[in-house]
Image (spheres, rainbow, N blue to C red):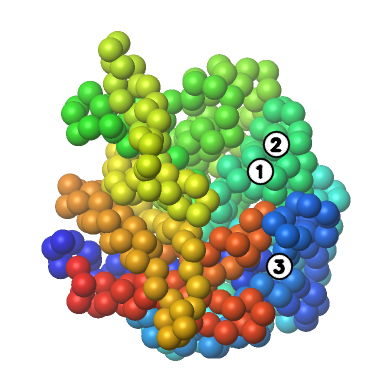
Amino acid sequence: MHQNTYPQSFAWGAATSAYQIEGAWAADGKGESIWDAFCRRESVTFAGHDGRIACDHYRRSEEDVGLMREIGLNAYRFSIAWPRILPDGTGAINSRGLDFYDRLVDALLAAGIQPWATLYHWDLPLTLCHRGGWLNAESPQWFADYTQAVVTRLGDRVRHWITLNEPQCFIGLGLLNGLHAPGLKLDWPDVLRAGHHALLAHGRAVQVLRAAGGDRFKIGWAPVGGARVPATNSPADIAAARQAMFAITERSIWATTWWADPVMLGRYPEDGLRIFGAAASAHSEEEMRIISTPVDFYGTNVYSAQIVAAGPDGCPRQIPPPPGVPMNMYYWPVLFDALHWCVRFLHERYGKPVVVTENGTSSMDWVNADGRVQDPQRIDYLRRQLQGLASAMQAGVPVEGFFVWSLLDNFEWHEGYRQRFGLIHVDFETGRRTLKDSALWYRDFISGKSR
């Protein structure tokens, strides 16, 4: 891998989200989120786990920034808990909640680490859920007001902003199949209306951020990657994989272009409008202008992919992974060229620089008797995904950053604490942190020793 593949300005980071690591669920004036309420229900998370304490990052953030520095990160992607800032979702601002992020940002900058702030990583204030949440047409304004409160306090130091993390998940898993908070199973018209409001919220937030920071800010979003990889490197299979990644052939919340085309191109895709039919939300030209307010980068969260080949008629057909394909602890197939093809296809279609806002794997990690956490699968996974990323960059794709999911083992939503994605092992009884071998490998990779 060429040393000069990555520009000096490249963001080498790790990512987290507020509910998954912070704990302190009711501290310092914080309001409840939909996840606080959801986790009180029976049998919705593995073994009844919740995020009330999680990694206790709220109280241990100084220690965690020290570990980031030890790993050699120059960027850290974290999310801000909306109900810490606005306990009722709107109205009175809780300055103590902002104080926490104020201290975190200062600690990061003092350690030479650029803060990348995500405004929404699924923890909607519970009071807003009671008012309809994303189904309420006022939700884009709520989000704009919240964004204004955050940027007013942090915008003098935070330059990198991400609006929404994975709308496919908080709308699809939260409102369509009930797997995530708030645990609803709505029909398509309601789901798509909520999704449209979320996209409007994204656009309104971009407008607020741009008004506050102008070109000084780098603004993007972080949807699911939706990666497709060609079965072979033949031109026919590559074309089929590209077509499959962006085509909508059935009603699915995971359709990449249903979310990305409005943001990047200012319109819903024709095939999606045809397939969703009357279930699709009515939308005005002005709404589409708001949604497509220009962003600076396309963030993508990539873990796995689907294999696609060209059929006899040239049309894409999905190829099942072969028996014995590598899998992570989620039983997602591990395809080592997922990142390469995902960033290539996204840049081809949307023309913006790409940031890998999440990439990683869940492994069966524990602290050995000698105190080490050996996670060779994660090292191999990251090395090979980064090789694919480098080859895409050498082919001309502008990639501006890479964030490992995750900095810390954490609360993995409905999977509780049984999924470990971290570079740092967390003992959830004591809070003790242990750098895994992958953290030491990543440190060497960032410094250029192991490329």
The quadrant the N terminus occupies is bottom left
Which residue is identified by label 3?
51
Snapshot quadrant of residue 450: bottom left
The quadrant the C terminus occupies is bottom left
- Number of residues whose C-alpha sits closer than 10 Å to that of mark 2, classed few (under 14), some (14–19) or many (20 or more): many
Name the residue: 53% across, 82% down: 433
In front: 235, or 142?
235
Residue extending farthest front? 369
- Number of residues whose C-alpha sits closer than 10 Å to that of mark 1, classed few (under 14), some (14–19) or many (20 or more): some
Number of marks in the rendered image:
3
**Circles 1 and 2: CB atoms closer than 8 Å:** yes
Q: Nearer the viewer, mark 3 or mark 2?
A: 3
- Taking 1 as reference, is 41 left or right? right
Snapshot quadrant of residue 150: bottom right
**Circles 3 and 1: CB atoms closer than 8 Å:** no
Instruction: Specify the amino acid type for callout 1.
Output: Leu
Which residue is identified by label 1?
173
Percent coordinates x, y for residue 237 in the rendering:
26, 27
Percent coordinates x, y for residue 393 in the rendering:
22, 53
- Taking 368 as reference, is 391 left or right? left
Instruction: Specify the amino acid type for callout 2.
Output: Leu
SS at mark 2 in the image: helix
SS at mark 1 in the image: helix
Relative to 226, does residue 112 appear above or below in the rendering? below
**Circles 3 and 2: CB atoms closer than 8 Å:** no
Mark 3 → mark 2, Cα distance in angstroms:
23 Å
Instruction: Specify the amino acid type for callout 3.
Output: Gly
